[in-house]
Amino acid sequence: MDKIVLLPNAEKDASFALSLATMDVLKEFCSKIYTENENKELISAGAIGYARDAFPTDAQLLLVLGGDGTMLHAASVAVEHDIPILGVNIGRLGYLAAVEPSELDSLKKLATDTYDEQSRMMLSVTVRTKDGGERFLANALNDMVIDGGGRLCDLRLFERDGYLDYRADGLIVSTPTGSTAYSLSAGGPVVDETMDALGVTPVCPRSFFSRSLLFGADTTLRILNMSARADVRISIDGCTDAALSLGDEVIVRRAECRLRTILLTPRNLLEVLSTKMNTQHF
């Protein structure tokens, strides 16, 4: 692997110090290092610039420098171009980033292909309006959230012929990757990222029943909005945002696409939780 796209978060690495240090390691084995045209400092150091609408067709890896938010944004790029993604953490938690700044030398494993590649499940989210029209919103790596704008909303969750009503501040449908994001904060379970499953967790439900539900990967979930207020909205990975009207139905299922990720060193769930989820990160 010697053709790599370097995607830094310019706000978190304002001086480009970590980005330039990363480039120094990559230069030892890369024939091409690409970056977006806006990253003048990296281009001056030898990277090849490209326009955002002209992604390099020979790129073999998307190397991201940032936190989980940066990784979520970059994931859509990696999926679109069917290349794996690897993150260097310069955020607080960095659950999605497998490399810490002190571990840059481990990137040399890319030169000899001594790494593991994983495939992570994503969600496909579609909205069906009460008049029967459908519109695809986006794919999600982490989650789909229906939010009542700080007020209670009424939602009905369907799975085949069964249903369950919620009166809550919102409802989260998450992937195993997203189980350590908003779902965890709402009391949801941690699910091994190598699994395929759909998790449903209510946000501050007005009910004695507040348990999360875990569904099989082939399940199609439908969520009916039964609130007439205009402030009920849906968000996908905290990015795509749209309003939901009374009678709109959100359809969530496993997406056909998957995110390819690179692991330079093996890691297991308990190790990740003990290193990433301890109190010093919060």
Image (cartoon, rainbow, N blue to C red):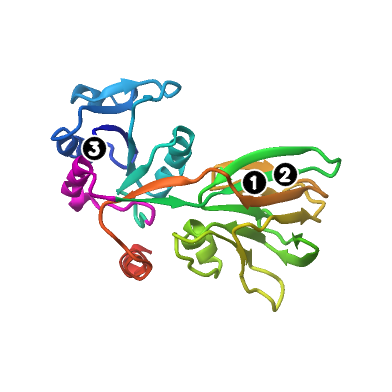
The disc, 2 or 3, on the residue closer to the chain's N-terminal end is: 3
Name the residue nearer the viewer: 273 or 259: 259
Residue identifier under label 3: 19
Residue 137 x, y percent position in the rendering = 64, 40
Residue identifier under label 2: 127
Residue 268 x, y percent position in the rendering = 34, 66
Label 1 or label 3, whichever lies nearer to me, is 1
Residue 51 x, y percent position in the rendering = 39, 20
Locate residue 52: give its quadrant: top left
Q: Amino acid at mark 1?
A: Val
Q: Is residue 263 above or below residue 188?
A: above
| 276 inside magenta stretch | no
The disc, 1 or 3, on the residue closer to the chain's N-terminal end is: 3
Residue at position x 40%, y 25% in the image: 55
Name the residue nearer the viewer: 280 or 103: 103
Q: Residue furthest bottom?
A: 208
Residue at position x 84%, y 41% in the image: 132
> Which residues are the magenta region?
95-115
Between the residue at mark 2 and the residue at mark 3, the CA separation in whole angstroms equals 40 Å
Tell whether 10 sits left or right of 45. Answer: right
Q: Residue furthest right?
A: 131
Residue identifier under label 1: 125
Locate residue 281: give its quadrant: bottom left
Tell whether 278 sits left or right of 191. Answer: left
Q: Is residue 165 above or below residue 3?
A: below
The numbered dot on residue 137 is: none
Q: Are marks 2 and 1 in contact (CB under 8 Å)?
A: yes
Asked whether the viewer can see residue 115, the reply is: yes
Asked whether the viewer can see residue 10, the reply is: no
